[in-house]
């Protein structure tokens, strides 16, 4: 089997190669300049005119090529770096997803074996059945996320979108999620009932579900979720806020990347795949919107801001295409 080298190995090789060829180029330039100076001196000594043969032009061309080669190398290095990071994140993803699949399957297996082999009373049996239902739900969520991501990445038109009233849609989702997660979500809104967006209902549910799921996972105590809806020119603004462990500012830039998993204050050992926020961002983008994390003045919890184009005021052409 081929030996797998570490990232440091490739970086060291890359740096050595760069040092070698830069030294050769440096040597060539210094020899060129020294020779040129020597020729000029000889010319002065013997009072003869030595034609410079376009020496300056050659030097300028040589230096420009060197700068171009350096720029190319630095781009190549950045590209390699991205690829290495992706490969590392992918390895983590495989380890994480194996765990995410195995855990619910094992607990469902235990629950089924217990129901089959023991003579349980009605109540205990219901508890085990609830465990099985929970495991099935977890697996379904995971598979839904992966399927939607793969279709989004293949850029196939996958969602049947419709014109929906934004506030109604959010209220409907809050109701469903409050029942599924037994969590209280407080909604405030300045929207008029006629404010409409173009969205696929299942996609909107996936967005909300991933946000709520994270708020619960990354919170040590009872979670409080606040959602505010408002107008912002031709956009509607959804501000989603929880009181969990928060996301350190240095992680903000990376948080929506595929497979990225962060380290959270006071919270350890939370399992995940690093796909949730990536999917949220892709779905928001698909519907013509934007998402970002807002800096939190109180330094507690996490606040996301989602902006969606109002229909038919904004991004008319794009939204019409979604509707066709
Ligand atoms: P996962 O939860 O599977 O790790 P996500 O893409 O959903 O992947 O989230 C990426 C990272 O962002 C998480 O690992 C976590 O560190 C951080 N994160 C996401 N949502 C929250 C939140 N509501 N509170 C604190 N940290 C969060």
Image (cartoon, helix red, strand yellow):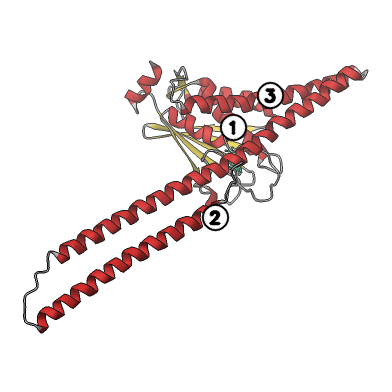
Where does label 1 land, which residue?
210
Q: CA distance from mark 1 to mark 3?
A: 13 Å
Image coordinates of residue 120 in percent, x first then y, are: 91, 19
Image coordinates of residue 53 in percent, x first then y, are: 12, 65
Element under disc 1: helix
Q: Nearer the viewer, residue 197 or 111?
A: 111
Mark 2 close to ligand 1, CB under 8 Å: no
Q: Is residue 17 left or right of residue 122?
A: left
Where does label 3 land, which residue?
137
Mark 1 close to ligand 1, CB under 8 Å: yes
Q: Residue at x 71, y 44 (%)?
A: 269
Image coordinates of residue 272 in percent, x first then y, are: 64, 37
Q: Nearer the viewer, residue 113 or 182?
A: 113
Q: Is residue 244 left or right of residue 126?
A: left
In terms of sequence position, does the residue under pointer 1 or pointer 3 come before the other? 3
Q: CA distance from mark 2 to mark 1?
A: 35 Å
Residue 202 in sight in this render = yes
Camera-near label (1 vs 3) is: 3
Tag of residue 8: 2
Q: Residue at x 41, y 63 (%)?
A: 19
Point out the residue furthest to the right here.
119
In terms of sequence position, does the residue under pointer 2 or pointer 1 come before the other? 2
Residue 297 in sight in this render = no
Image coordinates of residue 183 in percent, x first then y, are: 67, 32
Q: Residue at x 91, y 18 (%)?
A: 121
Q: Residue at x 83, y 26 (%)?
A: 110
Q: CA distance from mark 2 to mark 3?
A: 41 Å
Q: Quadrant of the N terminus?
A: top right
């Amino acid at each position: 089997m081929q030996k797998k080298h570490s990232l440091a190995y490739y970086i060291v090789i890359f740096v050595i190669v760069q040092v070698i060829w830069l030294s050769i180029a440096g040597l060539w330039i210094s020899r060129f300049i020294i020779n040129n100076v020597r020729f000029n001196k000889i010319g002065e000594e013997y009072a003869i005119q030595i034609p410079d043969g376009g020496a300056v032009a050659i030097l300028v061309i040589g230096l420009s090529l060197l700068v171009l080669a350096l720029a190319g190398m630095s781009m190549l290095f950045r590209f390699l770096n991205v690829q290495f990071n992706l490969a590392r994140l992918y390895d983590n993803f495989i380890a994480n997803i194996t765990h995410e699949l195995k855990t619910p399957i094992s607990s469902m297996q235990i629950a089924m074996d217990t129901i089959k082999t023991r003579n349980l009373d009605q109540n205990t049996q219901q508890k085990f059945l609830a465990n099985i239902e929970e495991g099935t739900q977890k697996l379904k969520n995971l598979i839904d996320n992966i399927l939607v991501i793969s279709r989004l990445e293949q850029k196939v038109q996958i969602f049947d979108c419709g014109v929906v009233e934004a506030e109604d849609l959010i209220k409907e989702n809050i109701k469903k999620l409050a029942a599924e997660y037994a969590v209280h979500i407080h909604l405030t809104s300045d929207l008029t009932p006629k404010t409409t967006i173009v969205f696929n209902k299942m996609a909107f549910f996936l967005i909300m579900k991933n946000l709520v799921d994270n708020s619960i996972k990354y919170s040590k105590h009872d979670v409080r979720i606040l959602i505010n809806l408002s107008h912002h020119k031709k956009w509607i603004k959804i501000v989603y806020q929880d009181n969990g462990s928060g996301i350190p500012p240095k992680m903000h830039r990376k948080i929506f990347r595929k497979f990225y998993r962060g380290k959270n204050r006071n919270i350890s050992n939370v399992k995940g795949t690093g796909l949730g926020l990536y999917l949220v961002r892709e779905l928001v983008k698909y519907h013509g919107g934007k998402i970002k994390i807002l800096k939190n003045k109180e330094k507690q919890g996490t606040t996301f801001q989602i902006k969606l184009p109002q229909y038919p005021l904004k991004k008319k052409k794009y939204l019409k295409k979604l509707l066709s």
